[in-house]
Amino acid sequence: MKTPIASLSLSIVSCVVLLFGICFSTQTFATRTQSITVPQNKSRLVTIPGSARRISVGNPDVADILIMRSNSIYVLGKQKGTTNVIIWDNQGKLITVLDVEVTHDLNALKAKLYEFLPEERISVYTSQDRLVLSGDVSSAERIAMAEEIASTYTGKNAGVINMMKVGGSHQIMLEVTVAEVQRSLVREFDSKFIFARNGSNWTWGGVNGGASFPDAISDSGTRFPVFDSSNGGVIGPVIDEIAPNPLNIDDNGLFASFMSGNTLFTAAFNIAKTNGLAKVLAEPTLTALSGEKAEFLSGGEFPVPVPNNENVTIEFKEFGVGLQFIPTVSSADNINLALNIEVSEIANQNAVTVTPSGSGTQFFVPSLTKRSAKTTVSLGNGQTIGIAGLLNESVTDVVDRLPGLGDIPIIGQLFRSQAFRKGETELVILVTPRLAKPVRRQDVSLPTDNFVEPNDWEYYLLGRMSELKAKAPNSYSTYSTQASAPIPSVVAGTEGKFGHSL
């Protein structure tokens, strides 16, 4: 049975606990902090948990506060920034604390971006007095447009933080084709002859190819000038002997000779026709990230001696197929390329032989035959464009003849030498960029997959060599190709028509 004293004690304890809980909950409720965002030059009504009696604003330049009703206040954003608002009731108790952030008008900016760029998904954020744009955009031009629109919502000293990027693949594989055909035609006809006749008083003749006439020979065999100034007269015959230049045929030709007691005729005809054909085909392929520079060289280096005051140093010059390019993905289907393509070969023409002073050593320095192109183009994924082309034709015709006699038909060929040279060159450089994506290793075939080496039995006894087996019909190919119509045959060769069309 409970006593009155025990019941009274229990009631007192219950009241104390209840009062403590009420005070704790009131304090927790009153110190609750709210965070609100207000666009600049716009207002907002905020409901507070209590009747406001007194308000304190941390930075009045950022936001202006006005009490509308006992539990509602009016917040006006004046300038971008942050501040806080402390609110008390009529008993001086703290009701709440408002953290106010005045930002850009993000909703208005989002509406403008959607109006001008409805297909793009651009997110808009604010960071203090600057705007932040992010998302995947279809092209670099649209990124620049979105950034320009957003800049109209910032102040003079503020800016836009651009975190947007072009969507899709950002790896570009560039295929380059350098194709060149050189044709040459050389016709040569070189006539050399000697005709001499010796009479009683006269020795006469003709020569085509050069000759010399040595001094006269005395009875004792010694030579002396035909015109002897010491004796004051002519001694001996005017032409004692003829020493013609050697008659030679370099490759193909005809010759004849006739000689009698007082007549000599010797002729040699160097007749040649040479056709030349050269083909150069280089197809380098290189992959790089968008905006990154990639370089490729397939060739080598040759030494070049550089003499100086003390010794001779060696420098190395590169030759071969070189490729440098910087790709930029401007949209999902458009690629900008900055290209530098070069194909060079070692040639003996225009070579230089260097002999340093104080040294008996000779250095042979070859020359380079180079084709290069440097440009910037823009084209779509998988499209091909010719960035450079050359169509060159040179003709040289040289005639060396004896005036008068060399103009006589047929017989005049004995008194003339002529050479005709014709060169034709056609060059085209094609580029094809592709947006590249990785593939599985087992789906890729290599050039060495079909290489088969013979074993000892096959090599020594059967005489087999290494070979390449035919590829399977369903072997993997990086790019699918479509059958094209057969190309009709045309008259070609070193003397046929030439030229390319793109």
Image: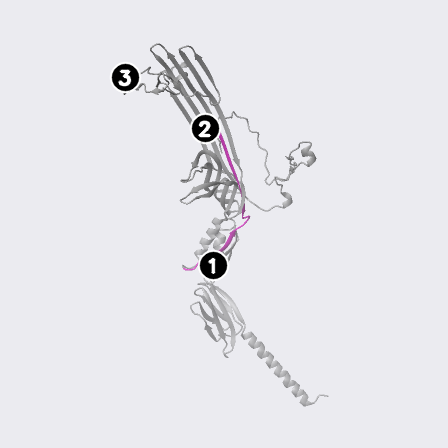
Q: Secondary structure at mark 3?
A: strand
Residue 73 located within the stretch drawn in magenta: no
Q: Identify residue type, mark 2.
A: Gly
Give the residue pinned by disc 2.
Answer: 423
Q: Residue furthest right?
A: 1
Q: For mark 1, give the secondary structure.
A: strand
Nearest the eye: 69 or 160: 160
Q: Is residue 142 visible?
A: yes
Residue 131 — which label? 1
Instruction: State left or right for residue 227 relative to residue 40.
Output: left
Q: Position of residue 41 (x, y in %)?
A: 44, 63
Q: Earlier in the sequence, mark 1 or mark 2?
A: 1
Q: Residues within 10 Å of mark 2 (few under 14, many from 20)?
A: some
Q: Write down the quadrant of residue 129 in the picture.
A: bottom left
> Gap in Å between the C-alphas at discs 2 and 3?
58 Å
Give the extent of the magenta segment.
Answer: 157-183
| Residue toward you, 38 or 314 | 314
Residue 233's label in the rendered image is 3
Task: In this rendered view, identify the residue nearer to me: 253 or 79.
Answer: 253
